[in-house]
Image (tube, helix red, strand yellow):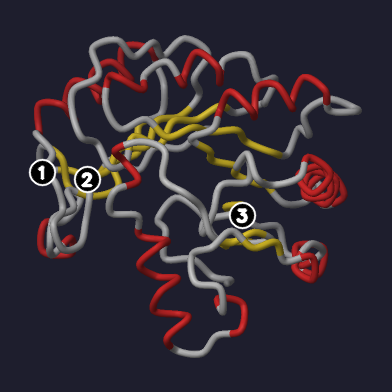
Amino acid sequence: MGKSNIEWTDETWNPVTGCTKISPGCKLCYAERLSGRLKAMGQAKYRNGFKLTLHEHELERPLHWKKPRMIFVCSMSDLFHEAIPTEFIGQVCQVMRRAPWHTFQVLTKRVYWLEELSGRMAGGWPPNVWAGTSIENDQYAFRADHLRHVQARVRFLSIEPMLGPLPSLNLDGIHWVIVGGESGPGARPMNPEWVRDIRNRCQAAEVPFFFKQWGGANKKAAGHQLDGREWRERPE
């Protein structure tokens, strides 16, 4: 996959596809739905549907993109899935290191494994790679604690789908927060007060706040304005 419709990135790069569910935010996984459609369309890369699959032939793709881009890594999987060999994760990281003109965004729910592997990485964490974790409700606010130990230039949170308030969330050492509601059939609702609380706390901590969408069955109709304006802040 290439040019992305995800509002906070430019491109997607998927040397891995497929995943398994580990927390409530995974219930209506968009990547799982999309993988099913792509398999039905006969796309060879998705012949296994949402079963975890490594694509070695995709590893060097970003090296052929000469114009600098913001690249979301493994939008159709989780690079730090426990079934992915550490050697393969290392190969992905080496490609990102070899492409310093790009900025890569790595997002994982398995942030404990990200924390451990980042500490072992030869040469340290690549300066052009942002590290992020997903948090859907307060039960998983601890993921931010693991993320704080990753020596990335930018550490970010994806609070999407936002399934509850986050009173325990600590924004210390966090450089960017993205918030969004769940979308598609059966989407669980998001309370505006949950969003406002995170927005207000980001403002107080001077952390850029990006509001992606309200979500729902028709996310376009619901829009992405909060209190009469768009919030599209990004790290410098």
Label 2 crowd (10 A; few <14 / some 14-19 / many >=20): many
151, above or below 179, in the image:
above
Residue drawn where x is 41% and y is 22% of the image: 207
Residue 203 place in picture, x, y as percent? 31, 19
Q: Nearer the viewer, residue 100 or 163?
A: 163
Q: From mark 1 to mark 2, how far is it between C-alphas?
A: 7 Å
Dot 1 corresponds to which residue?
189
Of badges 2 and 3, nearer the viewer stands 2
Mark found first going from the N terminus, 2 or 3: 3
- Residue type indicated by callout 2: Gly
Does dot 3 land on a helix, a strand or a loop? strand
Residue drawn where x is 21% and y is 56% of the image: 183
18, above or below 2, in the image:
above
Disc number for residue 181: 2
Mark found first going from the N terminus, 1 or 2: 2
Dot 3 corresponds to which residue?
71
Whether label 1 touches label 2, CB < 8 Å: yes
Relative placement, left or right, of 197 versus 27 is left
Does dot 1 land on a helix, a strand or a loop? loop
Residue 24 place in picture, x, y as percent? 29, 38
Quarter of the picture holding the C terminus: top right
Does dot 2 land on a helix, a strand or a loop? loop
Q: From mark 2 to mark 3, how far is it between C-alphas?
A: 22 Å
Of badges 1 and 3, nearer the viewer stands 1
- Residue type indicated by callout 1: Pro
Q: Nearer the viewer, residue 189 or 177?
A: 189
Disc number for residue 76: none
